[in-house]
Image (cartoon, coloured by chain):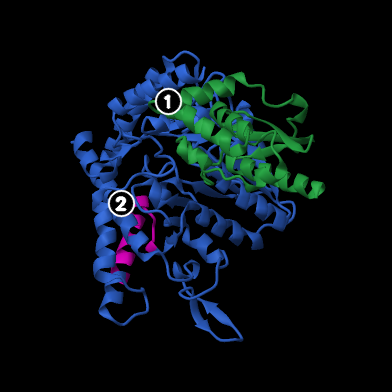
């Protein structure tokens, strides 16, 4: 699936929620269930320090696609990470570089991606794009 | 007569909604809200007599200067300073601390010792670490106990004739502990050390009498006590302020300037380089008028009721742990739900219109002591109500249900 198609799918899913509670409960459940990163990658090198919650991101290349795994110590942050991974993992570097993230607004989670939120998510998206740029350079 | 419903009408922001819910503002330790009486003073300043101060011969400048200096006198009276020129306007507590730390650069020598407490805000740690790096002085730390109180017997052991300076907060921002500063000051003076008290958290709750305390420096921010942001004061004893070199150079702080030599202005102007926050200073004075009209004894008594009520209600929630259970504390409740990150709790509360602080509260050493990433901090002001605490308790219960 393309990044755009996955984003549309997520927007569709979120449109079924009636209020913030359902949206947040969904993210919290996502955060609880998904094993997001191998513990060996939860290293200081992979950490993105938000002021409040920590985020770990690991990337590797498999068959010309970038595979991301990540984690957070806060569960709502982790739920959003799960969504971001669903969108960006297993994609070609160029597609990741070109992708926009406005779908986050569409699913009502805009406030979590404010640069002042200090939860590490903005840096995480930056990091995802940086990895994609690095891998793209290797490919070309 | 203290009537919270009447008081609440003074604060326009308290009637707004956040995320569709009535705002419950429990982040008062970060910044307090502003009453209409202070907002009016700000509007009046810019509407009627905005001008640069101290030098203009024109009427507006004179009016602005008079009001600004009146504010200095109000602040002097409030803190019972001996002289108005012992009140230095700053941009806030952090500025005041840096001003003093900078001044001590030329006083401290290699091997001198300075003492900080384990309960400090980063603002009352980092400037002194920088001072130690510059001078070779050694930083010692008064430890804390599980209740969040300073261990004074350990402080006694740290004091010696090498001690030159002690800097402690009056009240901890993260836990609300009221520190025994009278005792700390007396003991420091006994070994000849100067004392700076960070009064940022105490000033909205306790009226400090700097002469009675015999403190050398006391720093506060206006925005913690119903005033605007970007303004505060440093109180310093005249003899100390005369001893310390100027902090920043510029206009206002000079007596005479030639390219060969500049002589500095007398106190307080020596430390007030540049055009100050004139409107902010005047509004700070108005904020003190406002709080004094309500009365600090009334405020303390009411806030203590809120603290007891909140502590009792929150403690009833299973799995909730309160950090900071000092015998003497102000209306701050720092807590966590077992196994749940404070950021998550704060996010859910925000959705319900409840503003709390989450994180390490710029006091990482305290969080390290408890081995936690941070806490949820609810801090109450005199305009909060028990009904709002009930809303918080319901919010925390809901957060617990959703997150566990």
Quarter of the image for residue B45 reads bottom left
Q: Main secondary structure of the magenta part?
A: helix
Residue toward you, B167 or B342 = B342
Q: What residue is at 46 percent from the left and 46 percent from the top? A: B199
Mark 2 neighbour class, 10 Å CA radius: few under 14, some 14 to 19, many 20 or more: many
Quarter of the image for residue B360 reads top right
Q: Position of residue B274 (x, y in %)?
A: 47, 71
Q: Position of residue A127 (x, y in %)?
A: 67, 43
Residue toward you, A130 or B121 = A130
Residue toward you, B361 or B206 = B361
Chain painted in blue in the figure: B
Residue A1's tag is: none
Residue B287's tag is: 2
* Magenta segment includes B72: yes
Q: What residue is at 62 percent from the left and 42 percent from the top? A: A125
Residue A16's tag is: 1
Number of numbered discs on residues: 2
Q: Colour of chain A?
A: green
What residue range appears in magenta? B65-84
């Amino acid at each position: 699936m393309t990044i755009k198609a996955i984003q549309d799918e997520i927007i569709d899913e979120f449109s079924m929620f009636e209020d913030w509670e359902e949206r947040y409960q969904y993210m919290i459940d996502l955060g609880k269930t998904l094993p997001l990163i191998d513990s060996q990658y939860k290293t200081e090198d992979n950490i993105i320090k938000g002021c409040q919650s920590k985020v770990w991101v690991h990337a590797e290349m498999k068959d010309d696609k970038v595979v991301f795994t990540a984690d957070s110590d806060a569960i709502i942050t982790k739920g959003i990470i799960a969504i971001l991974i669903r969108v960006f993992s297993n994609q070609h570097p160029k597609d990741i570089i070109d992708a926009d993230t406005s779908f986050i607004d569409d699913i009502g989670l805009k406030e979590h991606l404010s640069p002042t939120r200090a939860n590490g998510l903005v840096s995480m998206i930056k990091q995802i794009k940086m990895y994609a740029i690095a891998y793209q350079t290797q490919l070309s | 007569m203290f009537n919270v419903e009447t008081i609440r009408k003074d604060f326009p922001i308290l009637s707004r909604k956040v995320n569709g819910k009535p705002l419950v503002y429990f982040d008062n330790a970060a910044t307090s809200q502003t009453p209409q009486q202070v907002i009016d003073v700000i509007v009046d300043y810019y509407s009627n007599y905005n001008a640069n101060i101290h030098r203009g011969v024109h009427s507006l400048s004179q009016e602005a200067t008079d009001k600004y200096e009146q504010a200095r006198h109000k602040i002097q009276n409030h803190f019972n300073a001996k002289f108005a020129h012992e009140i230095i306007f700053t941009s806030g507590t952090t500025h005041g601390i840096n001003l003093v730390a900078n001044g001590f650069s030329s006083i401290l020598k290699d091997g001198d010792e300075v003492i900080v407490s384990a309960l400090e805000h980063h603002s009352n740690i980092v400037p002194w670490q920088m001072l130690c790096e510059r001078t070779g002085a050694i930083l010692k730390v008064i430890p804390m106990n599980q209740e969040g109180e300073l261990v004074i017997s350990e402080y006694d052991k740290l004091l010696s004739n090498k001690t030159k300076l002690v800097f402690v907060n009056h009240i901890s921002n993260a836990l609300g502990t009221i520190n025994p500063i009278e005792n700390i000051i007396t003991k420091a003076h006994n070994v000849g050390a100067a004392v700076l008290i960070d009064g940022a958290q105490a000033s909205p709750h306790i009226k400090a009498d700097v002469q009675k305390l015999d403190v050398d420096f006391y720093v506060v921010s206006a925005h913690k006590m119903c005033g605007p942001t970007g303004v505060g004061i440093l109180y310093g004893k005249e003899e100390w302020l005369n001893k310390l070199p100027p902090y920043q150079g510029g206009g206002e702080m000079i007596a005479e300037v030639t390219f060969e030599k500049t002589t500095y202005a007398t106190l307080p102007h020596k430390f007030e380089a540049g055009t100050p926050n004139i409107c902010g200073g005047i509004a700070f004075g108005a904020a003190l008028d406002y709080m004094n009209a309500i009365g600090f004894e009334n405020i303390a008594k009411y806030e203590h009721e809120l603290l007891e009520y909140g502590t009792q209600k929150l403690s009833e929630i299973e799995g909730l742990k309160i950090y900071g259970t000092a015998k003497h504390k102000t209306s701050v409740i720092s807590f966590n739900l077992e196994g749940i990150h404070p950021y998550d709790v704060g996010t859910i509360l925000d959705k319900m219109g409840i503003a709390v602080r989450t994180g390490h509260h710029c006091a990482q050493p305290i969080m390290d002591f408890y081995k936690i990433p941070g806490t949820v901090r609810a801090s109450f002001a005199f305009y909060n109500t028990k009904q709002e605490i009930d809303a918080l308790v319901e919010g925390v219960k809901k957060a617990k249900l959703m997150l566990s």
